[in-house]
Image (tube, coloured by chain):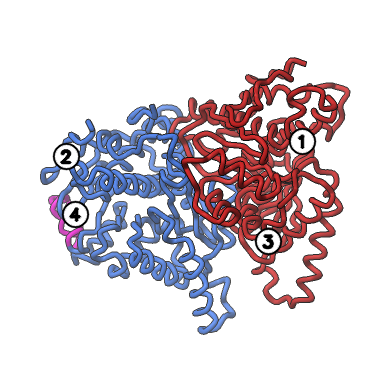
Chain colours: A red, B blue
Amino acid sequence: MEAVKCSSGGASFEADAECVLRAITPSLDPKRHKGQAGKIAVIGGCREYTGAPYFAAISALKIGADLSHVFCTQGAATVIKSYSPELIVHPILEESYSIIDVDDEGRRQISKKILSEFDKWMERFDCLVIGPGLGRDPFLLECVSKIMTHARESNVPMVVDGDGLFLVTNSIELVSGYRLAVLTPNVNEYKRLVQKVLGGDVDDQNTHGELLSLSKQIGGVTILRKGKSDLISDGEIVQSVSIYGSPRRCGGQGDILSGSVAVFLSWARQHISATKRESTISQTNPTVLGCIAGSALLRKAAALAFKHKKRSTLTTDIIEHLGQSLEAICPAS
Amino acid sequence: MEAVKCSSGGASFEADAECVLRAITPSLDPKRHKGQAGKIAVIGGCREYTGAPYFAAISALKIGADLSHVFCTQGAATVIKSYSPELIVHPILEESYSIIDVDDEGRRQISKKILSEFDKWMERFDCLVIGPGLGRDPFLLECVSKIMTHARESNVPMVVDGDGLFLVTNSIELVSGYRLAVLTPNVNEYKRLVQKVLGGDVDDQNTHGELLSLSKQIGGVTILRKGKSDLISDGEIVQSVSIYGSPRRCGGQGDILSGSVAVFLSWARQHISATKRESTISQTNPTVLGCIAGSALLRKAAALAFKHKKRSTLTTDIIEHLGQSLEAICPAS
């Protein structure tokens, strides 16, 4: 298999991202059946936010996942469903404002019910995306903490972004030591994570070393630090992806990334299990491979969208170019 | 910087609008991060109106803002969210019909809560757009008055249009003397403003002088009087924009304008602060620059849309041409 020769490894190098993407993307075999190319679930969507979980979930499908679910609040569900008939949307979460008259015992019951509804589905998923448009409601975040704990007990991988990072930064034990977790912080989210975990300010003179320490300190959780170049570390290696993307910084691009990483890391795990760790690439951490591929694809798609739409490029336009970018890197046949 | 030579100034001249637009539009620098190109909030959207706030908010994004929020009533929110996943929509406003059984004390509490929810966000915004699809419900307008007062205390700029102008015409003290406010009246809204503030009928023989007096009388608030030519004054200068637009007068074009002016005036303020008032253009009032650029862009986009769609041109078609018009005036690279 050609893909196994992707140059990577070493302490801190630019990843051969397109090679990684080609290596882990499964071939399209007519014998495969629904679900084998990936089943993703996004946990997010509340009173204010409906776009973010939609972007993450639809991106997963546009890349090639077979099924994409969203778990959100009831109000958000109606809207997210209306964005696309392709998604399966579960209106199971609750925010404090909708249970304002419920006493503590009632809340415990609601929380228990949410968890049991999620548990019915959990083991079907290849990866969860926690956080796009989750909001910061305390009751909702408490339920999501429990969902994360259950997912971890069942070894379901998770990509944590947005308000999920807010949750995790304040309760680092939720992911600490969990090798199947990926965090995807932007500039500000990274800063808060460094302050909380390493107890100091971000050191711009030592970006690789600091990221490595941060990941080690959280027990080998993979971190994708978004920026001009994306930097990825699992506490053992640092890889960067610097393919030129787009200069537009419209909100929502991070959601495409989290949805993409979820799919690619699922594929990387499949690839590694199928090749029995015999290739170089399959000796790399699948979460790192997933981050490399997701970052590369988003950048390619953003560059293409920007070429067409220039200053008016929005996240929706980038999503529309995911397929074309994937085809350019890794043709379907 | 070439742009500093834009011919403008003088007492009453046609603005070199494309030159102004080029001068204030920020370059697309890959080092910038989300939010730096502008965060806009539209206050509007009620039981009857959902299109207007959507038009204003999506136009801001299509021009190049990074984030666009809408604050509206609950019923309007579901619909506005469903128009586009790109917007962040806050269902916080209330109309009298939805609180019909609530007593005075209850109403005070609701009003207080609305204000405190808005305050959590306010200082993040570079500019507010007050009025698109706001409606005229007394309780809702009272809350919006308070929102305007808070925004003013925090020096957040605001563009006031539609029912926001109805509110302001009846309570001129809300904007009087606030140099970061822009009013964008159409023929009828201008007439009511003149009657209320100058106490007479519109004088078509003295359009420039009258606009100058009106603006002075409101303490230097910038007024963009929409018409065959758009006339702009801050009480010190009068500028006009007469670029040919479209003969279609479909509803919603004013919403594109208010959203655009909000973005351009934020950029003009950034430009002025970065160039330290050393260029000619940066000695001009940023609210005036924002109006000139917004007017020019809408006219260009309307002309392009009309070329394609003729009599069936709608506001959505014009929005689809904002990017192309911007690119024609001010190429992204």
Q: In this rendering, which labeled residue sits more in front, label 4 or label 3?
A: 3
Residue A60 included in the magenta stretch of the image = no
Indicate left or right for B242 with A314 as reference: left
Mark 4–mark 3 Cα distance, whole angstroms, equals 53 Å
- At label 2, which amino acid type do we have? Ser
- At label 1, which amino acid type do we have? Ser
State the residue at coordinates (15%, 58%). B213
| Nearest to N terminus: mark 2 or mark 4 | 2
Residue under pointer 3 = A141
- At label 3, which amino acid type do we have? Leu
Indicate left or right for A256 with B327 as reference: right
Q: Secondary structure at mark 1?
A: helix
Foreground residue among B128 and B145 = B128
Question: What span is in magenta?
Answer: B200-216
Q: x and y percent of residue A155 in the render?
A: 82, 46
Residue under pointer 2 = B8
Q: Chain of mark 1?
A: A
| Nearest to N terminus: mark 1 or mark 3 | 3
- Badge 4 density bin: few <14, some 14–19, many ≥20, Cα 10 Å: many
Q: x and y percent of residue B18 in the render?
A: 27, 34
Q: Chain of mark 2?
A: B
* Labels 1 and 3 in the same subunit: yes
